Image: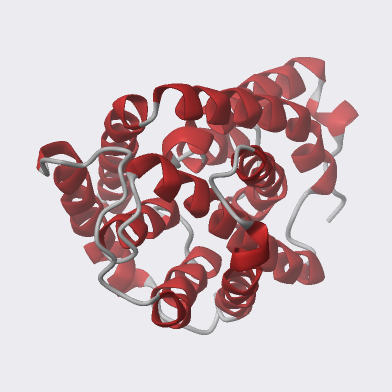
């Protein structure tokens, strides 16, 4: 199969995908869920589902990386302390992508909407969730060796909702405030995305020209989104997280009908 390139898709289609990537990068840097926008757009452009998911990893990795760097520069993430955790997420994402054709995922897809709606309800109705840190319920080493590889593996295996799972873990178990949890979520999102992308690249699934054409929009959106999150904090992150988690759950339910 010959990879469709920028010229074959046409200037109009590339412009739409670039604008879509910008919007996705902006939202994803704040609350996750950017794939809700880009994956359907890629499929509408003519990519089959497996290649749309793999190509989404190309541009999504750049967006998550841009947001992670922005948060790190602001002091919200200490990369020297988190590199080991990021490496675990990378390895877990690669393992999930490597086993995507070997493991049954249908059962997980059935319960996933319920979990996502539960996460949305938690952030919508739980009182006291703001940007202030609270008591840690799990030591960092245990957190890095349990929740991080579990979510990273899921990110490589299926993907949708991984950011919400990271967020919930950082808030409930690591005791981070909303903004700090968002910053660390983007670092791990980037790592597990990159791990999955490396495996998908070996299988030849990503359509590189399409994905790279979306990168500038994705990076610009991520840079602006992370700046807004750092300026406004939980007041914008919580509502967007609730909306994106609910929208993803409804989309998954619609796909099963």
Task: Tell me what residue is drawn at x 46 percent, y 80 percent.
Answer: 141
Lateral position of residue 139 relative to residue 141, left or right: left
Q: Is residue 186 above or below residue 36?
A: below
Q: Position of residue 245 (x, y in %)?
A: 30, 43
Position of 108 relative to 131 (above/below)? below
Residue shown at 34% from the left, 43% from the top: 178
* Residue 121, above or below 107: above
92 or 128, which lies in front?
128
Residue 110 in which image quadrant? bottom left
Percent from the top left, x then y, of residue 25? 58, 32
Q: Is residue 125 left or right of residue 54?
A: left
Number of numbered labels in the structure image: 0
From the top left corner, tell me how far across and down residue 206 is, in percent. 74, 55
The image shows residue 109, relative to residue 237, as above or below, that is: below
Quarter that holds the N terminus:
bottom right
Front residue (pair 65, 195):
65
**Color style of the picture:** secondary structure
What residue is at 36 percent from the left and 32 percent from the top?
A: 237
Q: Residue at x 37, y 53 (%)?
A: 167
Image coordinates for residue 33, horizontal then vertical, percent: 44, 41
| Residue 253 placement, left or right of 47 | left
- Choose between 136 and 111: the one closer to the eye: 136
């Amino acid at each position: 199969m010959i990879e469709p390139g920028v010229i074959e898709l046409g200037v109009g289609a590339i412009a739409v995908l670039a604008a879509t990537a910008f919007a996705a990068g902006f939202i994803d840097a704040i609350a996750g869920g950017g794939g809700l926008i880009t994956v359907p757009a890629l499929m509408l452009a003519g990519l089959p589902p497996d290649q749309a998911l793999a190509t989404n990893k190309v541009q999504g990795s750049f967006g998550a990386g841009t947001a992670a760097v922005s948060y790190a520069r602001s002091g919200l993430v200490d990369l020297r302390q988190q590199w080991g955790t990021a490496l675990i997420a990378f390895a877990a994402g690669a393992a999930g992508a490597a086993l995507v054709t070997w493991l049954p995922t249908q059962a997980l897809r059935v319960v996933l909407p319920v979990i996502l709606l539960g996460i949305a309800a938690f952030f919508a109705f739980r009182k006291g969730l703001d940007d202030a840190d609270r008591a840690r319920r799990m030591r960092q080493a245990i957190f890095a060796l349990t929740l991080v590889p579990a979510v990273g593996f899921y990110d490589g295996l299926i993907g949708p909702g991984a950011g919400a799972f990271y967020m919930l873990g950082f808030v409930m178990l690591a005791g981070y405030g909303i903004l700090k949890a968002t910053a660390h979520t983007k670092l791990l999102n980037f790592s597990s995305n990159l791990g999955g992308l490396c495996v998908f690249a070996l299988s030849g699934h990503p359509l590189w020209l399409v994905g790279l054409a979306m990168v500038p929009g994705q990076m610009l959106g991520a840079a602006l989104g992370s700046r807004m999150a750092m300026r406004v904090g939980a007041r914008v992150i919580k509502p967007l997280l609730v909306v994106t988690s609910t929208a993803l759950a409804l989309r998954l339910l619609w796909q099963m009908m």
